[in-house]
């Protein structure tokens, strides 16, 4: 099929209207994204949309209208909430879902008993619907799974040869699809965030909920309120990873990467190949640029992409909702003070791993070192210990370590008190040293709660006899003493269950294991 490229002239629009009226497919601009339109009342025409997009048939379409009153025959009832929303917003980048009338066939509604209706703001879109003289069913005019089209060239690239015509109306003003709000239940629910924000809807409707799938991944067995949410979406060929970090850390992080692209804001100073999506200060500019940026990444041949995280509020929620799907929900958390927390039982070989990470450029923050500093001669912290364990544990400004140990380990309660005092104080010093990328080397990572401050936790594990061999050789103690030390620590099982990664130090190559972990973490 030859696809006609039409302009927004009156003549071309009336031609396009005729194509739709006669059962054909026309892609047209709206203020959000380009739509792929067909006569909503003609089931055969609507089926062609699913075929051209490769769209699953249970994913319903939005019916577009030219005037507010055109919604009346499409729905069972205009509820008071619907009336309020239509009066306040239409025409708008907003889609309302209501119980459908018998006019709406099962192909359009994907078998549901509801229908999605929208009156677009874009003049060309409304002129086309008027010219067609019928309600127009239109999803975004992209191949299913790819980023929605916001420029005519995106539509041409996806739909050429598959549809009758494309109206070239230039770039779409807003750039991500309409807000979808369901008014079919008791409480209005946003199924897809867009230009009309939760706050704006709440002014008219009072309480408005947000479907759980909007900002997170749909759990297994959870049914999507909107069928569209369960499908892979907006995904370029490149693997996208969202980096949850402040600007400086993001820049530092991406500048360390090889063979990767940055998908960042215009203000970001980045030395690797980059594609920007708007300004950090304007969520509207991000919405406008996002889908084009995703397509550009493919055009540039990007394989791996690190994306700057947008704000999740206001219009930013719509941007984040699209980006997280484009990233298949991959988020790298660099907001925690420590990039990696490293722990393990005595003698498992933690320091060997830590040295190797240092050679890879990580700053190593050693808890034992700061614990010693905290308790060195004349340290003001010693008075805190004195208050708990007795004045005589200090002599001439010096801590009598054996005496403290005797008292602190005399009972479980006293040991707990010692930890309660020491852990936060040590951690405070460690956090002051935190930098990106860094490793917190902490034998008591879990006991101190420091694991919560780490982007990822790596435990080093080794069989007991190997640990004992190492401790006896290193600390010049007997096997019995070594076993006693291990006895008061968590079992290997605990480390495995509570860590993101484990390094097995039983003769297997450590470097290969770390390289594989780094590949996943960073
Ligand atoms: O901005 C937009 O809304 C664009 C332009 C062309 O108007 N259209 C658009 O359509 O984005 P589409 O098909 O790509 O997305 C429609 C979304 C899908 O996620 C679909 O599952 C959901 O709306 N939807 C449609 N009817 C529904 C219904 N009855 N109940 C729940 N969700 C529905
Ligand atoms: Mg779509």
Image: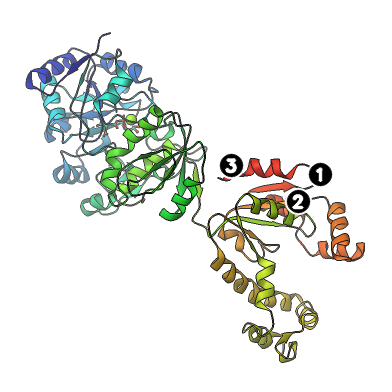
Dot 2: element: strand
Find numbered disc 1 in the image and state the secondary structure of the residue it sits on.
loop
Nearer to the camera, 308 or 155 = 308
Provide residue 493's location: percent of width, then percent of height: 75, 51
Q: Quadrant of ligand 2?
A: top left
Q: What percent of the width, then of the height, locates residue 348? A: 78, 54
Q: Which residue is mark 3?
A: 520
Compare marks 2 and 3 and give the one earlier in the sequence.
2
**In 3D space, how far apart are the residues under numbered discs 1 and 3 (Cα atoms)?**
23 Å
Say whether residue 441 is left or right of residue 325: right
Compare residues 209 and 353 and report the one nearer the observer: 353
Judge: label 2 CB < 8 Å from ligand 1. no
Q: Residue 92: name its quadrant.
A: top left
Report crowding for label 3: few under 14, some 14 to 19, many 20 or more residues within 10 A (C-alpha).
few
Q: Identify the residue at horizontal 15%, vertical 38% (top origin).
A: 91
Give whichever of 94, 499 is nearer the camera. 499
Question: Residue 374: x percent and y percent?
Answer: 65, 77
Q: Secondary structure at mark 3?
A: helix
């Amino acid at each position: 099929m030859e696809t006609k490229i039409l302009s927004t002239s009156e003549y071309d629009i009336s031609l396009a209207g005729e194509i739709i009226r006669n059962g054909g497919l026309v892609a047209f601009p709206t203020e959000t994204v380009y739509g792929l339109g067909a006569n909503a009342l003609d089931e055969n025409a609507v089926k062609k949309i699913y075929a051209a997009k490769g769209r699953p048939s249970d994913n319903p379409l939005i019916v577009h209208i030219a005037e507010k009153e055109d919604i009346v025959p499409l729905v069972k009832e205009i509820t008071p909430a619907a009336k309020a929303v239509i009066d306040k917003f239409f025409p708008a980048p907003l889609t309302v879902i209501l119980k459908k009338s018998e006019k709406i066939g099962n192909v359009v509604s994907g078998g549901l008993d509801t229908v999605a209706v929208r009156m677009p703001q874009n003049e060309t879109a409304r002129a086309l619907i008027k010219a067609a003289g019928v309600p127009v069913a239109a999803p975004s005019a992209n191949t299913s799974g790819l980023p929605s089209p916001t420029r005519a060239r995106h539509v041409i690239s996806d739909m050429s040869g598959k549809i009758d015509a494309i109206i070239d109306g230039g770039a779409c003003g807003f750039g991500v699809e309409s807000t979808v709000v369901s008014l079919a239940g008791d409480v209005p629910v946003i199924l897809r965030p867009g230009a009309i924000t939760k706050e704006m809807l709440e002014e008219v409707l009072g309480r408005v909920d947000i479907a759980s799938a909007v900002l997170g991944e749909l759990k297994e067995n959870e049914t999507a309120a909107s069928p569209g949410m369960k499908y892979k979406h907006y995904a370029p060929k490149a693997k996208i990873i969202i980096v949850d970090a402040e600007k400086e850390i993001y820049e530092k992080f991406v500048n360390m990467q090889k063979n990767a692209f940055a998908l960042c804001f215009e203000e970001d100073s980045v030395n690797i190949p980059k594609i920007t999506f708007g300004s950090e200060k304007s969520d509207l500019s991000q919405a406008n640029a996002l889908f084009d940026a995703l397509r550009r990444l493919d055009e540039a041949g990007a394989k791996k992409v690190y994306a700057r995280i947008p704000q999740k509020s206001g219009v930013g929620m719509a941007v984040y909702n699209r980006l997280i799907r484009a990233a298949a929900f991959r988020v790298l958390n660099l907001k925690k003070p420590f990039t990696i927390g490293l722990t393990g039982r005595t003698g498992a070989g933690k320091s060997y791993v830590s040295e190797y990470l240092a050679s890879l450029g990580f700053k190593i923050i050693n808890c034992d070192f700061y614990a010693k500093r905290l308790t060195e001669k004349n340290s003001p912290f010693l008075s805190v210990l004195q208050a708990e364990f007795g004045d005589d544990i200090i002599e001439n400004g010096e801590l009598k370590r054996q005496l403290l140990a005797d008292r602190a380990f005399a009972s479980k309660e006293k040991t707990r008190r010692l930890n309660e005092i020491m852990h936060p104080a040590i951690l405070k010093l460690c956090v002051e040293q935190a930098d990106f990328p860094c490793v917190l080397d902490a034998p008591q990572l879990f006991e101190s709660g420091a694991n919560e401050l780490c982007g990822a936790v790596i435990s080093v594990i080794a069989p007991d006899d190997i640990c004992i061999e190492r401790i006896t050789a290193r600390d010049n103690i007997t096997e019995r003493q070594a076993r006693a030390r291990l006895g008061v620590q968590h079992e290997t099982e605990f480390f495995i269950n509570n860590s993101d990664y484990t390094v097995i130090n039983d003769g297997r190559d450590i470097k290969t294991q770390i390289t594989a972990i780094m590949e996943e973490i960073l």
